[in-house]
Amino acid sequence: MLNTSSLIAFAATTDGQRARTFYEDVLGLKFVFEDEFAVVLEAHGTELRIQKVRSMAPQPYTLIGWSVSSVGEVVAALRSRGVKFERYPFLEQDAIGVWTAPSGAKVAWFKDPDGNLLSLTEPPRS
């Protein structure tokens, strides 16, 4: 039923302007519109609605992730824009914070200004 419908991704923020700046200027997403309820951006055909809320508690798991062709290149580009990548003591991550999963996928995590956990994944090579 829904396999032919477009997916909309959601996140939350307590500061719409700060979220817009991060997702638009730092991550490079296309701004669509903003109203009193949300900041709406577009990421390669997917709508991302960042809901404006009074308070929130970021979750400890990944909220949004991107599949990228080269995680190392994207990590370097985002670091140059001030993004700090997460380190986890229970994972073996390389010098730039990338973990190689048993499947061969390479994954790196970072947070938005509200503490939402975001990820980059380079799929395993065939």
Image: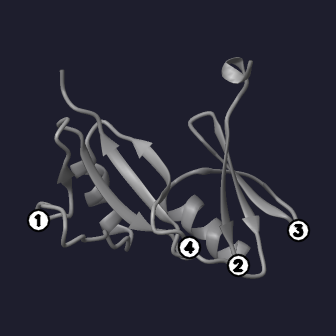
Q: Earlier in the sequence, mark 1 or mark 3?
A: 3
SS class, disc 2: loop
Q: Earlier in the sequence, mark 4 or mark 2?
A: 2
Q: What residue lies at 61% left-to-right and 77% top-to-bottom?
A: 57
State how far apart marks 1 and 4 are (Cα). 26 Å
Q: Are marks 3 and 4 in contact (CB under 8 Å)?
A: no
- The residue nearer to you, when weighing 118 against 70, is 118
- Mark 3 sits on what residue? 36
- Mark 1 sits on what residue? 95
Residue 31 vs 5, above or below: the answer is: below
Q: Quadrant of residue 84?
A: bottom left
Mark 3 or mark 2, whichever is nearer to me: 2
User: In which quadrant of the rendered image does the N terminus lie?
Assistant: top right
Task: In the rendered structure, find residue 14 and report the number of the disc placed on it.
Answer: 2
- Mark 4 sits on what residue? 58
Q: Earlier in the sequence, mark 1 or mark 2?
A: 2
Q: Amino acid at mark 4?
A: Pro
